[in-house]
């Protein structure tokens, strides 16, 4: 790689083998982050209820979905 870095451009990007695109791991990780945030927002204990910052967890889940939407179309 040159000192200036490397740039890959195209309508979609695939990095990996024929059957595995490592960039899909990024999308999978974003999905897990959203799921975890949703689970944290709805987690409760008897007589305590859901977290007082459940809204923040839900916002994080929404941001994860927005981030996924931003990148999913360029990943082959």
Image: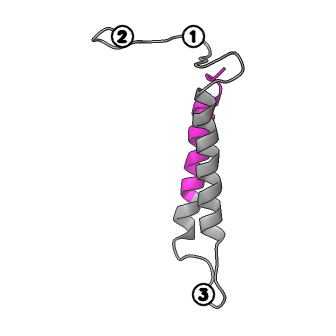
| Picture disc at residue 53 | none
Q: What is the image's colouring?
A: one colour
Residues in magenta, as a range: 59-76
The part of the image, by quadrant, that contains residue 17 is top right
Asked if the residues shown at circle 3 and circle 1 are in contact, with their CB atoms under 8 angstroms apart, the answer is no
Please tell me whether mark 1 sits on a helix, a strand or a loop. Answer: loop
Instruction: Report the residue marked by disc 3.
Output: 48
Q: Quadrant of the C terminus?
A: top right
Q: Is residue 66 magenta?
A: yes
Q: Callout 3: 10 Å neighbours few (<14), some, many (20+)?
A: few
Tell me if 45 is positioned left or right of 53 in this view: right
- Mark 3–mark 2 Cα distance, whole angstroms, equals 55 Å
Sort mark 1 into few (<14), some (14-19) or many (20+) by Cα contacts within 10 Å: few
On the image, numbered disc 2 is attached to which residue? Answer: 1
Helix, strand or loop status at disc 3: loop
Is 64 located above or below residue 19 in the figure? below
Local SS, label 2:
loop
Question: Which label belongs to residue 10?
Answer: 1
- Name the spot of residue 43 as percent of width and height, x first: 64, 73
**Marks 3, 2: nearer the viewer:** 2
Kindly identify the residue that appears in the image at 66 percent across and 70 percent down: 42
Give the alpha-carbon distance from disc 3 to disc 1, as whole Å.
51 Å
């Amino acid at each position: 790689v040159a000192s200036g870095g490397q740039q890959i451009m195209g309508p979609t990007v695939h990095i990996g083998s024929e059957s595995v695109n490592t960039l899909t791991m990024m999308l999978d990780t974003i999905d897990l982050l959203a799921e975890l945030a949703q689970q944290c927002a709805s987690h409760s204990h008897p007589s305590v209820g859901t977290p007082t910052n459940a809204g923040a967890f839900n916002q994080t889940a929404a941001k994860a979905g927005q981030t996924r939407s931003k990148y999913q179309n360029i990943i082959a």
